Image (cartoon, coloured by chain):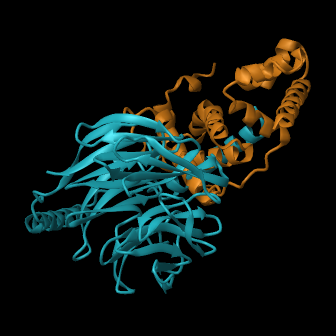
Chain colours: A cyan, B orange
């Protein structure tokens, strides 16, 4: 056995032994003595507990008829990393160099389109599906942009970008993308000529969304709003002390945006240039989507790793439902009318629908 | 074969005996190293991801439900998540190793070569490029997973000599592969 393998084994077994010893230390050293006083106390506690349970059962609201549940799972394979709805199809970026086209009505995979590299981001707009794919699996410095026809799935263009690709967004005058995610370079390009029409060097950044003629991105604990007409960048500070190590996500709409990716595990709502709500979803929030009157957020709890789909009432910020996803990490949430498709790290598309 | 190795993965994960986790590790460490090496093309990163994955598995093993998904699938689900995190962040988390007081170990040259080989789908054909005396012993140890002492007995030599031959073979492989890139 190699030195590395045997040393790691020893470390793990030692850690298991320490954990075992710590567990033993907390156990009682002798059996509990059944004294009459203790039995009476236990009975009193049990009666009190029963009373509390009965009270809570009476007060607890009955299950909501609108509770959503997973009604179908489609096995896509690969390593999904983002998805979008366009032209009546779900388009899923697969880290293994493909885009999977899924018919949300029949739940069938219609095609798998090779785009090369390792797709990093996907968006839709202008009758096209846009994918940025990095040329090296481990990042590197180059990437290319692929434009697919949202009706036929045909590859319309395949052009190099100016750096390592990151998040994409469509609207506000073109296609917005991080062309050098490590440096935080955001560009807008013309969707037909692919000419660069705007450039913002933010140094660092993550997450990108476009809505209502505003471009949103995140940087160093702040939310940046770009006015595409004037090029003015507004900074809303104090979202948190800093963003976490993982990706931050922005879900923008007509009135503002929802933000995740903060170390405090909160989902923040930004409207009118200020934070209007903070919601703790339990665990670290990841991807988001909005369907009708619900905000959906994925949340990961660690130690051990578990994932949940959390349904939030955006009006009052209350968590109204949790759906356990086990070890499946949601990589994208895509609303299709009232339903929600959850694309997971295990190569599945799961349909969540109101009961 | 010791009786302990006949226990199922489920039994090993639910055991209170620390050595049981070691046996579980023995069964899966090489396939996990290969899995990460194929995807990262970097032995150091593959080693780090493997260590963090086993640390996560150690912490989470009480929640593993025996009789459900196979333990290997459970382990690889943890691995896939670690890999995705690494691909997004550009670095390997050490959170769980720190929590368990497991320090990061440096990787020797021969360990790095061994991990690269585990990640090579065409490992057998790569081995063809080695001189015969090195090829057989590297294949026996790295691919067939035969321990040094067993090979030493078979070849009627010392364990140290076998270690040296394997190490030399892996170094040669690294040199051959390195000159191509």
Q: Quadrant of residue A308?
A: bottom left
**Residue positioned 89% across, 18% down in the render:** B131
Residue A260, picture quadrant: bottom left
Q: Nearer the viewer, residue A128 or A329?
A: A128
For the view shown, which residue lies furthest in the front direction? A193
Quick check: A303 above or below A101?
A: below
* Residue plotted at (32% across, 71% down): A253
Residue at position x 81%, y 18% in the image: B128
Q: Residue B168: x, y in percent? A: 90, 29
Residue A48 shows in the view: yes
Between B67 and A141, the residue placed more toward the observer is A141
- For the residue pair B134 and B13, the one nearer the viewer reads as B134
Q: How many marks?
A: 0
Q: Nearer the viewer, residue A334 or A240?
A: A334
Question: With B124 as the anchor, is A108 left or right in this view?
Answer: left
In the figure, A307 relative to A171: above or below?
above
Q: Quadrant of the N terminus of chain A?
A: top right
Q: Is residue A249 visible?
A: no
> Where is residue A23 shown, x and y percent of the image?
50, 54
Left or right: residue A300 versus residue B32 is left
Expressed as whole percent of the image width and height from the top left, the position of residue A117 reads 59, 44
Residue B151: image x %, image y %? 81, 18
């Amino acid at each position: 056995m190699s030195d590395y393998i045997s040393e790691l084994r020893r470390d793990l077994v030692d850690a298991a032994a320490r954990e075992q010893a710590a567990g033993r230390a907390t156990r009682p050293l002798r059996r509990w003595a059944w004294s009459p006083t203790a039995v009476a106390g236990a009975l009193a506690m049990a009666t009190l507990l029963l009373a509390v349970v009965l009270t809570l059962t009476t007060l607890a609201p009955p299950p909501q008829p609108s509770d959503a549940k997973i009604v179908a799972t489609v096995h896509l394979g690969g390593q999904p990393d983002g998805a979008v709805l366009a032209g009546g199809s779900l388009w899923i970026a697969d880290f293994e160099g493909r885009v999977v086209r899924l018919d949300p009505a029949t739940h069938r995979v219609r095609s798998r389109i090779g785009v090369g590299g390792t797709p990093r981001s996907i968006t839709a707009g202008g009758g096209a599906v846009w994918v940025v794919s990095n040329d090296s699996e481990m990042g590197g410095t180059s990437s290319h942009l692929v434009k697919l026809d949202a009706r036929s799935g045909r590859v319309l263009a395949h052009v190099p970008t100016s750096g390592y690709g990151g998040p994409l967004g469509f609207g506000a005058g073109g296609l917005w993308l991080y062309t050098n995610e490590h440096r935080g370079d955001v560009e807008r390009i013309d969707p037909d000529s692919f000419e660069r029409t705007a450039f913002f060097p933010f140094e660092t950044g993550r997450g990108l969304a476009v809505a209502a003629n505003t471009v949103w991105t995140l940087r160093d604990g702040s939310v940046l709003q770009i006015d595409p007409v004037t090029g003015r960048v507004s900074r809303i500070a104090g979202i948190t002390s800093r963003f976490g190590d993982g990706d931050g996500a922005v879900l923008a709409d007509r009135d503002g945006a929802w933000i995740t990716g903060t170390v405090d595990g909160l989902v923040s709502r930004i409207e009118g240039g200020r934070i209007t709500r903070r919601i703790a979803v339990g665990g670290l929030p990841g991807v988001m989507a909005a369907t009708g009157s619900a905000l959906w957020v994925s949340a990961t709890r660690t130690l051990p790793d578990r994932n949940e789909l959390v349904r939030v009432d955006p009006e009052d910020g209350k968590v109204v439902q949790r759906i356990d996803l086990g070890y499946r990490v949601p990589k994208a949430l895509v609303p299709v009318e009232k339903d929600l498709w959850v694309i997971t790290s295990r190569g599945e598309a799961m349909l969540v629908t109101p009961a | 074969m010791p009786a302990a190795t006949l226990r199922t993965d489920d039994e090993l994960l639910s055991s209170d005996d620390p050595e049981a986790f070691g046996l579980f590790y023995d069964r899966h460490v090489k396939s996990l190293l290969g899995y990460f090496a194929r995807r990262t093309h970097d032995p150091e990163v593959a080693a780090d991801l493997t260590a963090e994955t086993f640390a996560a598995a150690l912490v989470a093993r009480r929640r593993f439900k025996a009789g459900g998904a196979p333990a290997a699938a459970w382990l690889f689900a943890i691995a896939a998540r670690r890999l995705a995190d690494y691909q997004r962040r550009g670095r390997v988390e050490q959170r769980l190793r720190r929590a368990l007081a497991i320090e990061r170990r440096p990787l020797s040259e021969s360990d790095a070569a061994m991990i690269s080989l585990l990640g090579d789908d065409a490992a057998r054909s790569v081995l063809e490029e080695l001189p015969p005396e090195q090829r057989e012993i590297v294949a026996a140890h790295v691919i067939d997973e035969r321990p040094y002492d067993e090979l030493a007995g078979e070849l009627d030599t010392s364990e140290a000599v076998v270690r040296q031959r394997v190490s030399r073979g892996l170094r040669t492989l690294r040199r051959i592969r390195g000159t191509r890139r």
